[in-house]
Amino acid sequence: MATVSNHRTSTPASTSKRATLLTLLLLCIVLLLVIACFAVVYFVGDLTRYQEAISARETQTALRSVNVPEQLDRALKQFPANETLKLVALANKESIEIDAAAERRLDEAEPKELSKPIDLSAFSLSDLDALRQNLETARSRTASLAPADMALIKAERDKVENDAHLLKVGSNKIAKFMTMIDEQDTEVADLTSRILAARGEYYGAYEKSVAFLVKEFGLYKVEDGQFVFPFQFDADSYNRVAAAMEAAANSVAQLEQERTTLRQSQLGRWKTFAGRQ
């Protein structure tokens, strides 16, 4: 007896139909994936724009009431996670550390006698001669500070750049930030050089004034705190060196005021940078 099989052999038509359905299914899946990807990209982009808008508002709010650099720490405390404010804080920190280190070296070079008001009319000959030597040493030391100050500025600049990259705020923003830092450092380097030169001139003028008193010691008298010389020629000579010393002191004071003005100018630059982000 013959056995009847229940197995049905697929026809070419049915096979083609299944392949078409499978292809359509795959196309639908791919289309859904593409749509999903576009949706994610749109959502992420929209979220990024939203976050940037929030960050910009935070920055403007924090810096609106900042009028002097000393108030920047307070602004950062308002929004500690704000990346733009962190960059501004880095710029401010660099400026503070450069100024502090430069001032510390100047203080170390300055004669200890100048740490308080001096009454030269009360000095003995040995006191005057010791001060003259100290002023000469101070002038020499001040002249040697320039390379160290320039190296400090370079080191602080590199440190700021490294810290900025750690914030991961994007290469474009970091490039703009470092351009601002380089401009700032150029101004600081120029002012530092002029302050060193002015300090050197002041010590030199002071030294000449004291040296004149050493040379004339015993010939002049002191009346009511004033030097009285036996000859007008000597009085005129001393007045000239004393006037030069006073002019040099005024130059130093003006440059120190310029340092304050520069710090304020830097604040304006930082606020402009933050406002454009």
Image (spheres, helix red, strand yellow):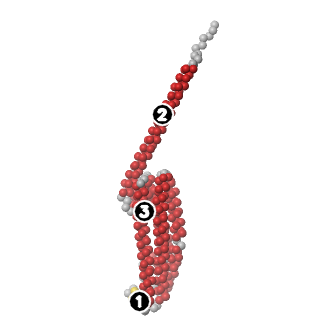
Q: How much space separates mark 1 and mark 2, taking CA atoms?
A: 101 Å
The residue most toward the top is 1
Of 4 and 194, the residue lying toward us = 194
The type of residue carrying mark 1 is Val
Which label lies toward us, 3 or 1? 3
Q: Where, by quadrant of the figure, is residue 77 drawn?
A: bottom left
Question: Which element type, helix, strand or loop, lies under badge 2?
Answer: helix
Percent across and percent down for residue 88 are: 44, 58
Task: Report crowding for label 1: few under 14, some 14 to 19, many 20 or more residues within 10 A (C-alpha).
Answer: some
Percent across and percent down for residue 255 are: 43, 71
Percent across and percent down for residue 230 are: 43, 92
Q: How much space separates mark 3 and mark 1, taking CA atoms?
A: 49 Å
Residue that label 3 marks: 266
Residue that label 1 marks: 228
Of 166 and 78, the residue lying toward us = 166
Which label lies toward us, 1 or 2? 2
Q: Which residue is drawn at 46% across and 39% down?
A: 38
Q: Residue at x 45, y 38 (%)?
A: 39
Mark 3 or 1, nearer chain start: 1
The type of residue carrying mark 3 is Gln
